[in-house]
């Protein structure tokens, strides 16, 4: 199977009536003058159904958004890029804060070596290269949702998460 075929529907939810694509709120924290997350956002839209896309260009904006977003919002995924200025520190701090708020967090970087040594907890997060394909994106989403405990919340909401297409 070709990768573009595999990207069509990799992350789904199951209700009593069958398989449905669950809508996700996606928060992208990235340098607004750059294009680091553009291709990744397109790939993400092929893997999941986005019902809302917020692009935040500063650590302050990200912090405010995370404080307004409850960890009970099981369908929120945060992509935090290490290109957020001042790079790479601001992106790592944003990822760390999203994780502290219990949100499904994915770090966007070509290499984990860019994570500042004093923010080593970011090594525990899911991560993706900006040009990652659909299978890698689905795996990162799976990992991030499990890490954030969103799977448990989704089950409490009557949804059973399952990754398909592998």
Image (cartoon, rainbow, N blue to C red):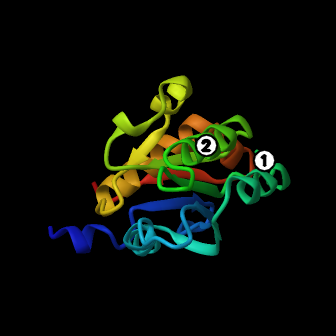
Residue 17 as seen in the image, left or right of residue 19: right
The C terminus sits in image quarter = bottom left
Q: CA distance from mark 2 to mark 1?
A: 11 Å
Q: Position of residue 6 (x, y in %)?
A: 27, 67
> Please, is residue 15 above or below residue 49 in the view?
above
Q: Quadrant of residue 49?
A: bottom right
> Please, is residue 73 above or below residue 113 in the view?
below
Q: Residue furthest front?
A: 86
Q: Position of residue 61 (x, y in %)?
A: 75, 60
Q: Secondary structure at mark 2?
A: helix
| Image point (78%, 47%), residue name | 72
- Residue 86 numbered mark, or none: none
The N terminus sits in image quarter = bottom left
Q: Residues within 10 Å of mark 1 (few under 14, many from 20)?
A: some
Residue 16 as seen in the image, left or right of residue 18: right
Q: Residue furthest right?
A: 68
| Image point (51%, 33%), residue name | 122
Q: Of residues 6 and 34, which is closer to you in this image?
A: 34
> Which residue does the numbered mark 2 point to in the structure image?
151
Q: Position of residue 163 (x, y in %)?
A: 42, 53
> Which residue does the numbered mark 1 point to in the structure image?
72
Q: Position of residue 55 (x, y in %)?
A: 62, 70
Q: Residues within 10 Å of mark 2 (few under 14, many from 20)?
A: many
Q: Of residues 66 and 164, which is closer to you in this image?
A: 66
Q: Earlier in the sequence, mark 2 or mark 1?
A: 1
């Amino acid at each position: 199977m070709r990768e573009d075929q595999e990207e069509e529907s990799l992350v789904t939810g199951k209700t009593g009536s069958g398989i449905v694509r669950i809508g996700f709120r996606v928060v992208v924290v990235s340098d607004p003058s750059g294009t680091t997350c553009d291709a990744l956002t397109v790939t993400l839209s092929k893997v999941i159904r986005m019902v809302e896309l917020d692009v935040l260009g500063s650590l302050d904006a990200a912090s405010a958004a995370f404080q307004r977003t409850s960890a009970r919002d099981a369908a929120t995924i945060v992509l935090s890029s290490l290109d957020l200025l001042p790079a790479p520190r601001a992106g790592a701090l944003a990822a760390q804060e999203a994780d502290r708020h219990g949100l499904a967090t994915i770090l966007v970087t070509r290499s984990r070596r860019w994570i500042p040594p004093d923010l080593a907890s970011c090594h525990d997060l899911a991560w993706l290269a900006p040009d990652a394909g659909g299978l890698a994106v689905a795996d990162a989403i799976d990992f991030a949702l499990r890490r954030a405990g969103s799977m448990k919340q989704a089950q409490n909401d009557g949804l059973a998460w399952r990754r398909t297409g592998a």
